[in-house]
Image (cartoon, grey):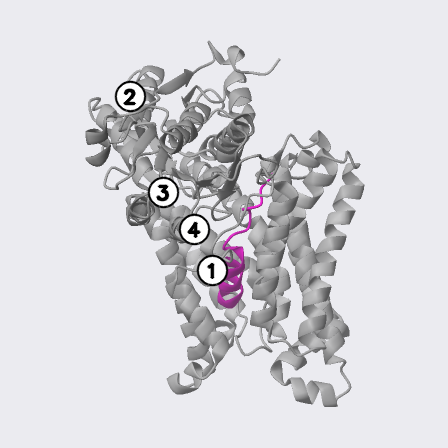
């Protein structure tokens, strides 16, 4: 018995059983159901497939931080080939997997043969590959072929296919690692690399193979993810590398190398999946998700060191341990690789102009579909009609601090005017610097009233919340369980949440079961929704507050066979959103007039520069501008009754 308990795989399996039994006792009828358990496995399938390769790497004493980016790039490349170049599905998949292998080869060659540190090499590759994913897909690619989507969306014995792929890969690799001499050599390499080399093992070739394998598995996982979502997103896989490393360490791998079993990767991911599922069932706030993940990773490292019986002093001498501990304290999310700014590849500057004026839009996420298709498209069109140069700058993905850095960097270039996406009160100081520098500055979308901005055009997000709340009351008859999600902590969305709750609290028969952070990510929204449905089979409705909430919620609602039964209200009106309304999956879209406030925001800047609307000299000296201080452009209410007016014929 003592020997069994000392086996990390056995002890972890026992822990999982105990946690699952306790969850079943505490949450009977919610946790121990086929739907809930199968959803847990579906949600962890992508991470586990990558974790299999990471386990082999850690056994050999290495790791790869680029796997999350490879997941995104693989799906985006396959989608690009199929959607834009009309390449047959099998060929697109093979090309995507080939490029994944090449990425692994480059990592492995530079690390094994050129001696580059694995952390430095794979961290650099993470940024490169993420950039390639953004370059290939822009704001993401949707409308993928039926047979591609069927790869993940099909079922066998009522179980979705990614689970079967995961079990097949884990089983095959576990068997080969245990029964083939080639893979057994990784334990010798991790245990004592010098001794392994002296015994005749080609350590460099073995390391090269392991990096190629983990990259190949990440590429395959990316294809499965894009297939399941029905869309390839350049933001997919963010944070995956740390989740995978956490799962592998929990599963028995040592940071020193030489130990671990392939099946441990599955068990580690399963424990994390169960904990995440329990947090949803227990109504634990989404604010705690990243904190708990970081704590789990730190505990995993501590347990690893405890089992090795090494002193704290020796642990702190290990740079790998320090790296993981630091990542854990950051909530297991790597800092953005964009540095300052990233220019949206599909929104290039208009260079052919007869004027020297440049108007700059600074957004908080240049790759978000809603921004690309509405704000940026309108701004570019405005620039062409006014025959002026326009530029669109900002971080690739949602990042308020990076947006602040961008604004401050742009001020130094002295643009003619600044059109700033209002995202958070924290950007007020940067806006003030622009105004103090004499640059005409207009805020659009959501107001930053605590700034010196010359004007604001956009939407009152409180009204968005109220519209969703009123419609949800109507759809549910004023009773039932409701959940909502968006980007937690973002000021405009928090205003929207407040508007929703102010309506719902007037109806005592309506129960709010949770507020969740989907990180403006379709995959995350789908996972949250799946867990909510498992935890609350009688869920009446879900409200979404960012561009990707609706598609993610709809995906899991359809997968659960509850389309039309669980009411969905959300924001934005992309073609995908409109089609979901037409199908009866989404019941309401609270649409902003994004082209309107972007166009007139730019026009306000032009008027300020050219003094189109003149004031008296005294007004001008007093600092009074010729612009309205605040313009509320209102909302568009889209339901099944009028969606046909918005769908393209």
The residue at which mark 1 appears reads as: 334
Q: Which mark is residue 406?
A: 4
Residue 163 % position (x, y)? 61, 46
Residue 487 % position (x, y)? 38, 41
The residue sitting at 53% across, 28% down in the picture is 558
The residue sitting at 28% across, 18% down in the picture is 478
The residue sitting at 67% across, 63% down in the picture is 174
Q: Of label 2 and label 4, which has the lower sequence position? A: 4
Q: Of label 2 and label 1, which has the lower sequence position? A: 1
Relative horizontal placement of residue 643, taking residue 23 as reference (left or right): right
Q: Secondary structure at mark 4?
A: helix
Q: Is residue 32 above or below residue 198?
A: above
The residue at which mark 3 appears reads as: 439
Q: CA distance from mark 2 to mark 1?
A: 42 Å
Relative horizontal placement of residue 70, taking residue 432 as reference (left or right): right
In depth, the one of 492 and 6 nearer the eye is 492
Locate the C terminus and report the quarter of the image it occupies.
top right
The residue at which mark 2 appears reads as: 479
In depth, the one of 103 and 472 nearer the eye is 103
Between circles 2 and 3, the one closer to the viewer is 3
């Amino acid at each position: 018995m003592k020997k069994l308990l000392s086996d990390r795989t056995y002890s972890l399996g026992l822990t999982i059983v105990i946690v699952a039994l306790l969850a079943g006792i505490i949450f009977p009828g919610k946790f121990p159901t086929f739907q809930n358990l199968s959803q847990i496995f579906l949600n962890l399938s992508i991470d586990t497939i990558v974790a299999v390769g990471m386990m082999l790497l850690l056994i050999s004493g290495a790791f790869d931080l680029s796997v999350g980016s490879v997941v995104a790039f693989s799906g985006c490349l396959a989608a690009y080939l199929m959607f834009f170049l009309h390449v047959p599905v099998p060929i697109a998949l093979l090309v995507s997997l080939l490029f994944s292998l090449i990425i692994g080869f480059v990592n492995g060659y530079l690390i094994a043969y050129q001696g580059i540190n694995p952390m430095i090499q794979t961290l650099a590759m993470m940024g490169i590959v993420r950039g390639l994913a953004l370059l290939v897909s822009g704001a993401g690619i949707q409308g993928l072929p039926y047979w591609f989507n069927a790869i993940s969306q099909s079922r066998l014995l009522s179980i979705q296919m990614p689970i079967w792929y995961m079990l097949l890969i884990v089983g095959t690799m576990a068997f080969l690692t245990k029964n083939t001499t080639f893979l057994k050599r990784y334990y010798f390499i991790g245990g004592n690399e010098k001794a392994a080399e002296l015994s005749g093992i080609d350590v460099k070739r073995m390391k090269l193979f392991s990096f190629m394998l983990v990259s190949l598995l990440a590429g395959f996982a990316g294809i499965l993810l894009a297939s399941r979502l029905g869309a390839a997103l350049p933001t997919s896989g963010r944070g995956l590398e740390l989740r995978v490393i956490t799962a592998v360490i929990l599963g028995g791998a040592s940071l020193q190398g030489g130990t671990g079993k392939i099946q441990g990767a599955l068990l580690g991911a399963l424990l994390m999946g169960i904990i995440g599922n329990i947090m949803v069932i227990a109504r634990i706030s989404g604010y705690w998700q990243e904190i708990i993940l970081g704590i789990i990773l730190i505990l995993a490292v501590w347990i690893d060191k405890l089992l090795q019986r090494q002193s704290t002093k020796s642990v702190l001498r290990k740079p790998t341990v320090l790296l993981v501990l630091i990542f854990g304290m950051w909530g297991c999310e790597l800092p953005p690789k964009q540095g300052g700014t990233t220019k949206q590849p599909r929104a290039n500057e208009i260079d052919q102009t007869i004027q020297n004026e440049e108007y700059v839009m600074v957004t908080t996420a240049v790759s978000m579909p809603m921004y690309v298709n509405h704000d940026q498209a309108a701004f570019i069109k405005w620039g062409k009609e006014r025959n002026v140069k326009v530029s669109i700058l900002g971080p690739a993905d949602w990042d308020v601090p990076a947006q602040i850095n961008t604004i401050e960097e742009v001020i130094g270039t002295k643009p003619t005017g600044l059109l700033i996406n209002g995202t958070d009160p924290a950007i007020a100081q940067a806006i003030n610097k622009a105004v103090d520098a004499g640059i005409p500055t207009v805020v659009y979308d959501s107001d930053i009233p605590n700034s010196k901005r010359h004007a604001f055009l956009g939407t009152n997000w409180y009204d968005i919340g109220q519209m969703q709340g009123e419609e949800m009351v109507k759809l549910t008859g004023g009773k039932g369980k409701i959940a909502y999600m968006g980007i937690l902590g973002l000021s405009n969305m928090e205003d929207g949440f407040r508007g929703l709750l102010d309506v719902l609290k007037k109806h005592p028969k309506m129960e709010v079961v949770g507020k969740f952070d989907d990180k403006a990510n379709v995959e995350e929204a789908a996972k949250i929704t799946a867990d909510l449905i498992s935890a609350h089979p009688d869920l009446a409705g879900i409200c979404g507050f960012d561009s990707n909430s609706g598609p993610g919620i709809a995906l899991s609602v359809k997968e659960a066979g509850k389309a039309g039964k669980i009411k969905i209200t959300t924001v934005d009106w992309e073609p995908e959103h409109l089609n979901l309304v037409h199908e009866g999956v989404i019941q309401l879209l609270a649409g902003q007039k994004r082209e309107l406030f972007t166009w007139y925001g730019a026009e306000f800047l032009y008027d300020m520069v050219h003094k189109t609307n003149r004031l008296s000299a005294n007004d001008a000296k007093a600092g009074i501008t010729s612009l309205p201080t605040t313009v509320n452009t209102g909302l568009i209410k889209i339901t099944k009754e009028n969606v046909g007016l918005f769908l393209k014929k």
